[in-house]
Image: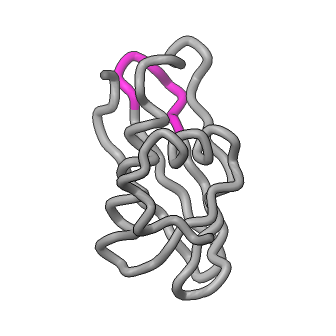
């Protein structure tokens, strides 16, 4: 894995997980919109083309899920990648907003 650091940037309206990657000037990102204090809408993931398929986006989703559990909020996964990961990880259902 090429992640050296994951930063979480958040405001009242939106947020972003930004992964700093070894050997890449471009970071990987997962973005979301705050729908309410208890719900975020995960709307986009982006990984540099040359580093796709290495689990980087999954690591960002796992971090978001962990933060949702710790923060007591739920996730609406509208990004197709994030949605597919929720489908593959039924153990995340506790943070999935129906």
Image point (53%, 19%), residue name: 52
- In-image side of 5 versus 18 (left or right): left
Of the 4 image quadrants, the one containing the N terminus is: top left
Total of numbered circles in the picture?
A: 0
Q: How is the image coloured?
A: one colour
**Is 37 placed above or below 97 here?**
below
Start-end of magenta stretch: 21-28
Residue situated furthest top in the rendering: 50
* Residue drawn at x 61%, y 17% as measured from the top left: 49
Name the quadrant containing residue 15. Answer: bottom right
User: On the image, which quarter does residue 12 sit in?
Assistant: bottom right
- Which residue is situated farthest in the front direction here? 90
Residue 6 position within the rendered picture, expressed as x and y whole percent measured from the top left: 35, 47
Front in this rendered view, residue 35 or 26:
35
Q: Is residue 8 magenta?
A: no
Closest to the observer: 23 or 56? 56
Q: Main secondary structure of the magenta part?
A: loop
Measuring from the top left, give residue 92's x and y in whole percent: 40, 57
Residue situated in front as seen by the camera: 75 or 50: 75
Tell me if residue 29 comes above or below residue 63 in the rendering. above
Residue 26 position within the rendered picture, expressed as x and y whole percent measured from the top left: 54, 29
Residue under the point 54% across and 87% down? 37
Q: Position of residue 3 (x, y in %)?
A: 33, 31
The residue under the point 67% across, 79% down is 35
Residue situated in front as seen by the camera: 7 or 58: 58
Viewport quadrant of the C terminus: bottom right
């Amino acid at each position: 894995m090429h992640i050296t650091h994951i930063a979480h940037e958040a405001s009242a309206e939106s947020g972003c997980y930004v992964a700093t990657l070894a050997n890449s000037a471009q970071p990987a990102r997962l973005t979301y919109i705050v729908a309410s204090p208890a719900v975020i809408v995960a709307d986009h993931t982006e990984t540099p083309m040359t580093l796709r398929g290495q689990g980087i986006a999954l690591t960002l989703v796992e971090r978001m899920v962990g933060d949702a559990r710790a923060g007591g909020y739920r996730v609406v996964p509208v990004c197709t990648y994030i949605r597919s990961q929720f489908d593959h990880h039924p153990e995340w259902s506790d943070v999935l907003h129906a």
